[in-house]
Image (tube, rainbow, N blue to C red):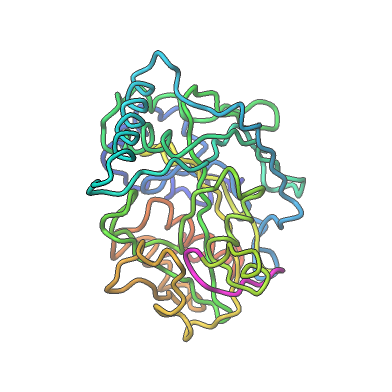
Amino acid sequence: MTERRNLEWLYNSPRTGVVAQWVQRHASELQTFPVMDESVLLVNAWEEMGPKNFGYRPDQVTMSKEGQENLLVPERSSELWRIREAHALEQQALAADPNRSRELDANGPKLHLREFTAWLTDRRLVHFKMWHSDWWNVRTLNMGLRDRNVPEHYREDILPTLERDHYIFKSAHPNFVVVHAVVVTSDGHLILTKRVSKSDFHGDAISASIEEQMNGRLDNSPYDTFYRSVDSSPKMKLSGRGGEELRLHIKADRIGLAGVILEPDVNGTGLIIIGESGETSEEIDARILGRDKAEFDPTRPVWTLPLKNPDMAIQQLLDPPFKWHGSSRFRLLTALFAVHGYDEIIQRVNSA
């Protein structure tokens, strides 16, 4: 874990709204966790990163999933259960209506992060223990917190507890796991996308590079989610799962797990994975958008930020010219560490 003295500014980064209020209430518990925008950085592999090391390789990361029979749902006596059941009844009625005027809210398989290895700096295997969840849980609790449709006390126990060498989420309420995919081009540019204004989460925000919720049925590793969302290599095309968000060619030896975050605004957990594409920055335009291109702003869906001269990127990190997605400044910092190494970027940030 990066020492606080190296990145003191991360601990004093401004927050707004419910995240600022939540951070204030949990100040004593958050003393060792950097908080920026709407995200809490729980663990990271930054100090070991550099041009030859993108973090934890796929062979260093393992994952288990509890059986589908152990699907995590809200307690049946809770307000959340009543909200969830009301939504289920609404969807049943909508499905039976041949003249329905809106689409069904399909209840797909999602994952809840139960526990994970606490440290990412000693080169051990990293293990994630997942429980099965579903989209209606996400809609009920996570979007409910965002929209303040559920009581604020549901946000109070979402921080994990450190027990020996693992962090464990003990909340009775399901979080949901998202891979926060960072993609750097072969000539050292960070790929940025802009989310459509009507997005479920963080509409109109700039992402570095995309986010994809883990699928409880398809994904047996966070790398499965990463490749499914941004890789369009022949192998992924054969599987029929690649290129959902972006259609790129990810270098198999240039990919790694770099951090784990918590998003207290929506009780989400994020796994930061960074990879390098075979494409150069000149090849990055709307043509690389994948099957889910409707998720991006049509006026300027994708572009790049050069990282070779880090000072411009650091300026956008410290004084953002636009609305970043909740964890994207953490991801920009991750990309800078991958291109230039930890020590150089720390020195430049602290002298900026």
Most distant residue in the top direction: 77
Q: Residue 109: horizontal and vertical position, in percent?
A: 52, 41
Residue 50 vs residue 297: left or right? right
Picture residue at 76% right of the left edge, 45% below the top: 125
Work out which quarter of the rendered image holds the N terminus and state it.
top right
Q: Residue 14: horizontal and vertical position, in percent?
A: 32, 46
Work out which quarter of the rendered image holds the C terminus and state it.
bottom left
**In the displayed structure, would residue 4 be above or below residue 113?**
below
Question: 279 or 239: nearer the eye?
Answer: 239
Residue 184 vs residue 10: left or right? right
Q: Residue 181: horizontal and vertical position, in percent?
A: 52, 59
Most distant residue in the bottom direction: 282
Image-quadrant location for residue 228 = bottom right
Q: Tell me, yes or no, whether the highlighted magenta stretch contains residue 190.
A: no
Image-quadrant location for residue 311 = bottom left
Q: Residue 23: horizontal and vertical position, in percent?
A: 37, 34
**In the displayed structure, would residue 341 be above or below residue 35?**
below
Instruction: Give the extent of the magenta segment.
Output: 244-253
Q: Tell me, yes or no, whether the highlighted magenta stretch contains residue 248.
A: yes
**Prevailing SS of the magenta stretch:** loop
